[in-house]
Amino acid sequence: MIATLKEKIGDENISQKEIDKISYSSDASRVRGIADSIVWPRTLNDVRTVISYAKRHRINVVPRGAGTGLAGGAVPQNSIVMDMGRMNRFAVKDDKAIVEPGAVLDDINSVSEFVLPVEPGSHSVCTVGGMIATNAAGMRALKYGKMIDWIDELHVIDGNGRLIKAKGEKIKDFCGLEGTTGVVVRARLKLAKLPQKRSTSIFSYDAITPLVEKFNSLKKENVLAMEFIDKYCSRLIGLGDSNHLLVEYEGDEGSIKDEESRKVWKARDGLYASISSKGYIIAEDPQIPLESIDKFLYWLQKNDVPTFGHIGIGVVHPHFKKDSKLVEEMFAVVKKLKGSVSGEHGIGLLKKPYVGQEFIDRVKALKAVYDPNNVLNGGKVI
Amino acid sequence: MAESTKCTECGLCRTACPVFDIMKVETLSPRGKVMLLKEDVKDEIFYACTLCKNCTVACPLKLELDKDFKNHRAKLEEDNKTTDAYKVLIDNVRKYGNPFGKVEEGKLPKELFCC
Ligand SMILES: Cc1cc2nc3c(=O)[nH]c(=O)nc-3n(C[C@H](O)[C@H](O)[C@H](O)COP(=O)(O)OP(=O)(O)OC[C@H]3O[C@@H](n4cnc5c(N)ncnc54)[C@H](O)[C@@H]3O)c2cc1C
């Protein structure tokens, strides 16, 4: 069966080798799935060919970027894994970029003073397609928002094999839908200049209340990033035995500058892996209304849940051990505080049990239009 | 404990790996190889590593995965699952003291063998 696909997209762009099936069976969530085959499209037409083939043979297709997703969004379910890594060309002109989905964020940001300022901790490897599909946020979301704020236009191949050019409100039909409504094949993005002068301050507090008071009192205009790091995580990166607020300023208001400042943020980048290596392999990302963030942090502290995250936008990362009963309890608290299940990582496989009916209805309606045969990333999100 | 058992599979090693960087195939990335090690897969793919240690530099846990890959090559050797090129290379080193085989004075090697 697969021979016909080989003929169309080239032998070197498809594999059913056992070793490839194993390495593509998971993403950074470490949930294992089953890959039927792996394809590496090089053009929009290749993407369309694979989707048409999958539709005809009723096989599921999972688009995949760098596989750094933490919700299992790129984990195959007896699927064709479509690795977008070879569609990685991009062009930057002034404050605009045209990119293919497999382009890596740090590569795009290395060619000009204009950058895509949305910066997930995985910036050195994550792809722009994955960022669009998860509506990624990150460290500087307080100042620069989420991925959706930086998209001018998307080109997408939907589950019917149609090329859709989405602008304005239509972008929302794809951005954040984790590849369930279409495969992003090209995007026109806005870029910005990061301020030349940046500095950092670290504030430490034993208790949550003064930390949240400080957080509320900080002038938001010149603050680029604001990160919460609890006691457990602070110990892991050598900050000592308190809760910390890490603040990055535009200008030199912060006490730590240049190389020292970069070191602090690099340590923060490595936190996910450090916690995960201690057995806390489930990384959640609820978004809590800022007026209730103190209540949420108290709950996490009371239950000894290691946590860090982008407190500036109310997205924090509580970490749990496998099969922890606390996950369910936490989502009940999130609901009570009128928070949302995922602020940036997406729903994927892992957070499906916690999404609300309104979201399910919306996804079903979009699927009916863009992917009625459920070819794209089936079993995800809802 | 083997380094790969501590790997969290975050993928931050991907772009640091020169082999992955060219091929863009997960299986060739350090994380991909770790997944194969976890399943004890014996395959010549473990020779597609330059042992450059760039993955250690990029790894938030500073795991020295190259050590595991090298140890795994030893197991492949025991099971006679090495690559033909590798066999020739080792033979040449034993016979001529270099991986290229017999090289005449002032001449370039006729065949280059690398692992
Ligand atoms: C160490 C670490 C730190 C992280 N920090 C952050 C953070 O600060 N903020 C944040 O938001 N996330 C963070 N993440 C999560 C993850 O890196 C982001 O979600 C990232 O945007 C995923 O990009 P990717 O290329 O790895 O996508 P993948 O993991 O490969 O895919 C993610 C989802 O997008 C879909 N997809 C991929 N490409 C396409 C495409 N071309 N078209 C349609 N769908 C597609 C996949 O099917 C999947 O559902 C972090 C992860 C790690 C490991």
Image (tube, grey):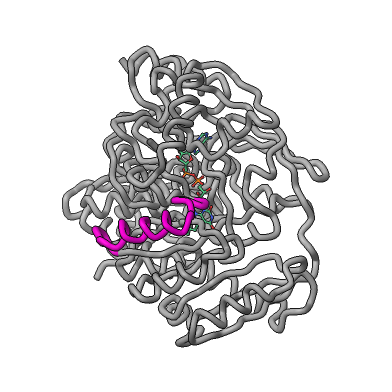
Residue at left offset 23%, top offset 48%:
B42
Q: Which residues are magenta?
A: A321-344
Quarter holding the N terminus of chain B?
A: bottom left
Horizontally, is B77 left or right of A236 in the view? left
Q: Residue furthest left?
A: B79
Residue A5 position in % (x across, y down): 40, 17
Residue at left offset 36%, top offset 61%:
A330
Residue at left offset 77%, top offset 79%:
A253
Residue A137 position in % (x across, y down): 58, 53
A330 in magenta: yes
Q: Residue furthest front?
A: A336
**Vertical placement of residue A272 versus A208, above or below:** above
Horizontally, is A267 left or right of A35 in the view? right
Horizontally, is A38 left or right of A170 in the view? left
Occupied quadrant, residue B97 = bottom left
**Vertical placement of residue A155 versus A68, above or below:** above
Q: Is residue B101 visible?
A: no
**Vertical placement of residue A265 versus A131, above or below:** below
Count of number-bearing discs: 0
Residue A241 position in % (x across, y down): 45, 87
Residue A270 position in % (x across, y down): 49, 68
Residues B51 and A161: in front is: A161
**Vertical placement of residue A39 versus A8, above or below:** below
Q: Is residue A46 visible?
A: yes
Residues A320 and B86: in front is: A320
A193 in magenta: no
Q: Residue furthest right?
A: A94
Residue at left offset 46%, top offset 15%:
A8
